[in-house]
Image: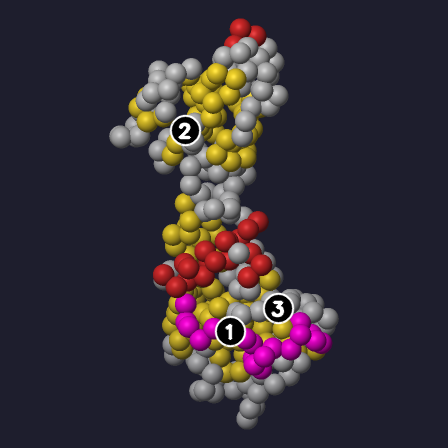
């Protein structure tokens, strides 16, 4: 008894994500750098005042991770490519409290000074220029710091995973409508404390968010068309790209141990393998076969097994 199986896996256990949007806001001006290749945090020391720079970043996790996944770790990495001083300055991640925009403003030169904002650009005064003002100039964000990193000279820096950071990323996945991303705030008092790092538009050094997650066991749809004597398709979700996925079957309830997975079994007596394949890098694979005509009217127990992490899906009973 065989089936055609379309395996549509969502993501690997760890994925590196570039921002869906990012920008920089400059103190005291209706300007931005949404389309720029660089972001600044801290104090640029260019004049007697209006030197503060803050970076805003947002990710769309709902498009990359399967719904219902559990986030277990998250860490942000940036690449500093310019600084006035090699002295370390602490930069903190704060959760933003409202939606904001990335427009087409593109600062010139070293991009330490913002450009005139276009429609939808976030600025010091507006979350989306020219309207939608922030409640507080400089951005509306929570007071709690999710993670910090000491940015010093040119180099790569990571904001490590913390329980608060993980909880915020989990919130993005669970309630995408409230995914407003983060604002990075450095030491804004000393002159010339600013650090510059690549934005998502940077060709070689964009920010990356490494998210480790547990998608849960693979899920499986009912067979289509669900009748005997023809090819049948079962769609499996939440498999791991590159991992082997097996469809097993039998007609009686019971237990069959999964080889290589101590203490793990499927809920089928004398389970047999229908077919198997590897999910490709995008998480897709196809297994082939057909349900024989003689299986008509027979209740069959179906279950998906993913040996890579010893994950077993829920048993499905289908009468062909």
Q: Which of the two residues, 196 or 240, is positioned nearer the viewer here?
A: 240
Q: CA distance from mark 3 to mark 1?
A: 12 Å
Residue at 52% x, 17% y is: 319
**Mark 2 neighbour density, 10 Å: few (under 14) some (14–19) many (20 or more):** many
Q: Which mark is residue 100?
A: 3
Question: Which element type, helix, strand or loop, lies under badge 2?
Answer: strand
Splitting the image into 4 quarters, where does residue 267 fall? top left
Q: Is residue 27 above or below residue 281?
A: below
Q: CA distance from mark 3 to mark 2?
A: 43 Å
Q: Is residue 269 above or below residue 148?
A: above
Splitting the image into 4 quarters, where does residue 110 fall? bottom right
Asked if one can make out residue 242 in the rendered structure from this viewpoint, the answer is: no
Question: Which element type, helix, strand or loop, lies under badge 3?
Answer: loop
Range of residues picked out in magenta = 128-146
Q: Which mark is residue 141?
A: 1
Question: Which element type, helix, strand or loop, lies under badge 1?
Answer: loop
Residue 161 x, y percent position in the rendering: 38, 60
């Amino acid at each position: 008894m065989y089936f055609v199986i379309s395996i549509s896996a969502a993501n690997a256990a760890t994925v590196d994500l570039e921002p869906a949007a990012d920008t920089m806001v400059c103190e005291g001006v209706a300007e931005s750098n949404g389309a720029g290749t660089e972001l600044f945090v801290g104090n640029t020391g260019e004049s007697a005042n209006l030197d503060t720079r803050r970076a805003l970043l947002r990710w769309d996790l709902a498009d990359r991770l399967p719904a219902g996944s559990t986030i277990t770790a998250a860490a942000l990495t940036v690449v500093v490519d310019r600084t006035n001083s090699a002295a370390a300055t602490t930069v903190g991640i704060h959760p933003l409290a409202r939606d904001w925009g990335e427009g087409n403003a593109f600062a010139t030169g070293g991009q330490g000074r913002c450009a005139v904002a276009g429609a939808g650009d976030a600025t010091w005064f507006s979350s989306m220029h020219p309207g939608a003002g922030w409640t507080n100039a400089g951005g509306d964000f929570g007071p709690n710091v999710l993670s910090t990193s000491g940015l010093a000279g040119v180099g790569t820096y990571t904001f490590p995973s913390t329980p608060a950071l993980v909880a915020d990323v989990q919130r993005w996945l669970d309630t995408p409508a409230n995914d407003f991303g983060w604002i990075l705030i450095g030491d804004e008092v000393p002159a010339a404390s600013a650090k510059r790092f690549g934005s998502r538009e940077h060709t070689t050094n964009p920010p990356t968010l490494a998210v480790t997650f547990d998608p849960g066991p693979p899920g499986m749809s009912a067979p289509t068309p669900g009748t005997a004597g023809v090819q049948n398709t079962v769609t499996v979700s939440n498999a791991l790209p590159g991992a082997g996925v097996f469809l097993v079957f039998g007609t009686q309830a019971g237990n069959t141990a999964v080889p290589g997975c101590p203490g793990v079994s499927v809920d089928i007596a004398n389970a047999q393998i229908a077919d198997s394949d590897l999910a490709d890098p995008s998480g897709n694979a196809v297994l082939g076969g057909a349900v024989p005509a003689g299986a008509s009217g027979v209740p069959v127990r179906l279950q998906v097994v993913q040996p890579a992490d010893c994950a077993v899906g829920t048993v499905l009973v289908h009468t062909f």
